[in-house]
Image (spheres, grey):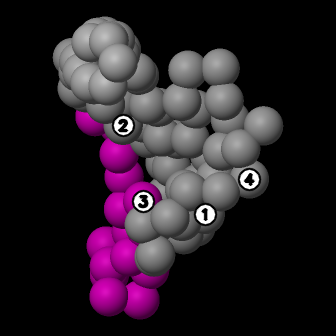
């Protein structure tokens, strides 16, 4: 289930576009089918949790990984 909880912004978003606080959760389920010498099917379940902090660089947890999501570039890095 995807949820957004208590996401807050400043009144003038043009000056400060990033959420000050709150959490967004995205759950993804999909199936990967690969063909080759034999057919392999893998089912994947991932839960991504973004915790907004008022900056463009926010923590995101992806299963067992903790990373940084850059809201301005939409890139993820720094995963541990």
Main secondary structure of the magenta stretch = loop
Q: Return the disc, 2 or 4, that comes first in the chain's sequence.
A: 2
Q: Return the disc, 3 or 1, that comes first in the chain's sequence.
A: 3
Work out whether 74 lies above or below 31.
Answer: below
Measured as percent of width and height from the top left, residue 23 is found at 42, 36
Q: Do callouts 1 and 4 mark residues in contact (Cβ within 8 Å)?
A: no
Q: Is residue 48 magenta?
A: no
Image quarter where the N terminus lies is: top left
Dot 1, crowdedness within 10 Å: few (<14), some or many (≥20)? Answer: many
Name the residue tied to disc 3: 19
Front-lying residue, 63 or 39: 39
Q: Nearer the viewer, mark 3 or mark 4?
A: 4
Q: Is residue 18 magenta?
A: yes
Which numbered dot is residue 14? none
Q: Is residue 55 left or right of residue 31?
A: right
Q: Secondary structure at mark 3?
A: loop
Measured as percent of width and height from the top left, residue 14 is found at 32, 88
Q: Which residue is farthest right?
A: 80
Dot 4, crowdedness within 10 Å: few (<14), some or many (≥20)? Answer: few
Q: Is residue 60 left or right of residue 19?
A: right
Label 2 to label 1, Cα distance in Å? 14 Å
Name the residue tied to disc 2: 24
Name the residue tied to disc 1: 57
Q: Secondary structure at mark 1?
A: strand
At 36% from the left edge and 37% from the top edge, which residue is drawn? 24
Q: Do callouts 3 and 2 mark residues in contact (Cβ within 8 Å)?
A: no
Work out whether 13 lies above or below 35.
Answer: below
Q: What residue span does the magenta drawing correspond to?
A: 4-19
Name the residue tied to disc 4: 78
Label 3 to label 2, Cα distance in Å? 11 Å
Front-lying residue, 36 or 52: 36
């Amino acid at each position: 289930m995807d949820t957004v909880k208590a996401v807050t912004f400043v009144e003038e978003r043009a000056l400060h576009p990033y959420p000050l606080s709150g959490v967004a959760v995205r759950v993804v389920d999909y199936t990967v089918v690969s063909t080759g010498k034999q057919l392999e099917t893998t089912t994947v379940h991932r839960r991504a949790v973004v915790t907004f902090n008022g900056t463009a660089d926010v923590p995101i947890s992806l299963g067992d990984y903790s990373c940084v999501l850059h809201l301005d570039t939409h890139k993820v890095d720094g995963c541990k």
